[in-house]
Amino acid sequence: MDERIREHAETLVDWSARVEAGDDVVVRVGEGAHDLAVAVAEALGERGANPVTVYAADELDRAYLRAHDGGFDEDPDHELALYENADSVLSLGAERNTAATADIPADRSQAHARAREGVREARLDTDWVSTLHPTRALAQGAGMSYEAYREFVYDATLRDWESLAAEMGQLKEILDDGSEVRIVNDGTDLTLFVEGRTAVNSAASVVYDSHNLPSGEVFTAPDDTAGVVTFDVPMTVRGRPVRDARLTLKDGVVVDWEAAEGEDVLAEVIETDGGSRRLGELGVGMNRGIDRPTGRILFDEKMAGTVHLALGRAYDACLPDGESGNDSAVHVDLITEMGEGSRLEVDGEVVQRDGRFRWEDGFAE
Amino acid sequence: MDERIREHAETLVDWSARVEAGDDVVVRVGEGAHDLAVAVAEALGERGANPVTVYAADELDRAYLRAHDGGFDEDPDHELALYENADSVLSLGAERNTAATADIPADRSQAHARAREGVREARLDTDWVSTLHPTRALAQGAGMSYEAYREFVYDATLRDWESLAAEMGQLKEILDDGSEVRIVNDGTDLTLFVEGRTAVNSAASVVYDSHNLPSGEVFTAPDDTAGVVTFDVPMTVRGRPVRDARLTLKDGVVVDWEAAEGEDVLAEVIETDGGSRRLGELGVGMNRGIDRPTGRILFDEKMAGTVHLALGRAYDACLPDGESGNDSAVHVDLITEMGEGSRLEVDGEVVQRDGRFRWEDGFAE
């Protein structure tokens, strides 16, 4: 076995999910994740945990959903009981064809998801973690060779998470104590308020309330944004490319927008509802293992030297108890690069300049 | 998709497991069973059932069991709850390497099985059915090309089960009403008593208390056997070949034995305990789709024109209420061919001659 697969499994089980002896674990195995599943089984055996392994195959979902008449039973007993009795759920994504579910009618999938709301909640009530095993299909989706994509995934995933968590803790503290955030780069000059909000140190571990491996971002829920922002990192939104989207905000609301490509899908998102005209998330990517966008938000938004903002729904974890943040049916992340000439300021103090934080070598005073 | 795979799935879901709308189904998918699992998902979608798909992979079991210290938790809550809440369990066997678990220490597997006794009982309490999807590894084990092996499996599996069930019902009736069974062929002249015992019409459906697809045998629990029997169908017992085993029985007990090959493993089985010196099962193979032994008991014992006898444990289903049959830690099937010159008699009447039943064309009066 490739030693990186074993290391991935150990990171997932120990750092991310904190599995202990006696834990009842559900492992969800994507179609192409067999090798990682073997390594996870080994790690769970060593720790004395109890796995039930679910085969989470897109082609099975497609066959089932297309054949069904759409009148789904609500939260089947056996499925609900499985997740309600689990301590952790480890999802090993590994598509063999990223378009495998392209011909499921959208209303069928939505009806099925609605009928499984209780199962979903039971799953989110566990120490759940989602990760990704590199496949040829995912490499193809990223426009990379298989070998290069595997290097990319393991660079992103096999970090020194403890030291990254400590570094991200510094930014979290600054954002928690701060009030006004200003983002400046080529095409962007935006101010956002974060007074009273709590940033999440998303360090790829359930103890940080972070459920993705890899992770590596600090995010919070902004308010009252104003200015202009250009998203120069290429994105795929609802299956369509969006390039150089540019938003103008006033009093927290998007008042104007344009894009070099995909302006129609951008308009679709913005015009969804009241909350989709506001920003629900400000996130700062800090994972230096991610050196390029690959069209997958799990990786893209964590890329070091980028900032992302989401149109739509805010995360409750960032809000004071009892306060509800921006609400919307959508949450669409868009990313801007913090390169030469960029600045991230909090209350007038420069925290990051030219993509380097003030605690990093090479930071220009 | 190969239309035979779809037909296999429909036979499994409709004829064997009798799945209905609203049923909570666990589908256990072996490593090589993806294609059959897709067809089963489609069939379950059409019927409006609710599947949870478990990945039953030998390589995961091996990794887990070898890594574990052997102190297994008893019946983990989430696993037990899954099966306790299931209506049916469909197991799709499909090894990619029939030796995948060869290096798991036997005591580790046994300790794990003991700790999962409650899970096993919960599974057996459902409408469970085991079937097999042809893989290259299974073809190799049978000494056949992949293409020929697939034909073999589908010939065995895609039968007209309704008419076979009716035919087997005739033999069941004869055995249920009868007292003395006599088996005669080249090397065999054996009498067995079946008075008061109930034969199982194993027609590959839960409504017949038959849990294998394919099936196609009628079996009962004999008593007080006497005579000689030669098992000329090659078998693999505990991984070792056994050829032309010959038993001599008196007053129901094996008093002498020999074999052209594997006499040592035969002795091992016979000398296990008190019950292993007696025959717990008399079975008559009636599946005409199975035309050769392939080293897998699921198929071999159902082969038309054969009779099998098992050393050891009897099945409760064959015994009158409250009566316990032959008890033993082992149940080892051995098969004898009913070719030219053979006779199966019940109470002196010939039921089968030269391998043909009296209701078949070509039966010699």
Image (spheres, coloured by chain):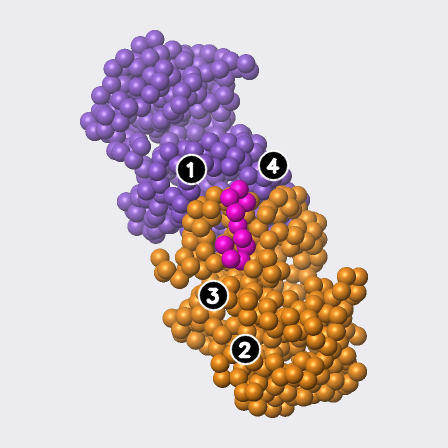
Chain colours: A purple, B orange
Say if mark 2 contacts mark 3, CB within 8 Å.
no
In the rendered structure, which amino acid carries the disc numbered 4? Glu
Which residue is located at x 59 percent, y 66 percent? B202
Question: To which quarter of the image does residue B175 belong?
Answer: bottom right
In the rendered structure, which amino acid carries the disc numbered 2? Trp
Q: CA distance from mark 2 to mark 4?
A: 56 Å
Which residue is located at x 39 percent, y 39 percent? A289
Span shown in magenta: B14-23
Marks 1 and 3: which is nearer the front?
3
Disc 2 chain ID: B
Q: Nearer the viewer, residue A107 or B330?
A: A107
Say if mark 4 contacts mark 3, CB within 8 Å.
no
Q: Secondary structure at mark 1?
A: loop
**To which residue does mark 4 refer?**
A84
Q: Nearer the viewer, residue A353 or B145?
A: B145
Of callouts 2 and 3, which one flags the residue occurring earlier in the amino acid sequence? 3
Q: Nearer the viewer, residue A66 or B17?
A: B17
Disc 4 chain ID: A
Marks 2 and 4: which is nearer the front?
2
What number is the disc on residue A70? 1
Q: Is residue A347 magenta?
A: no
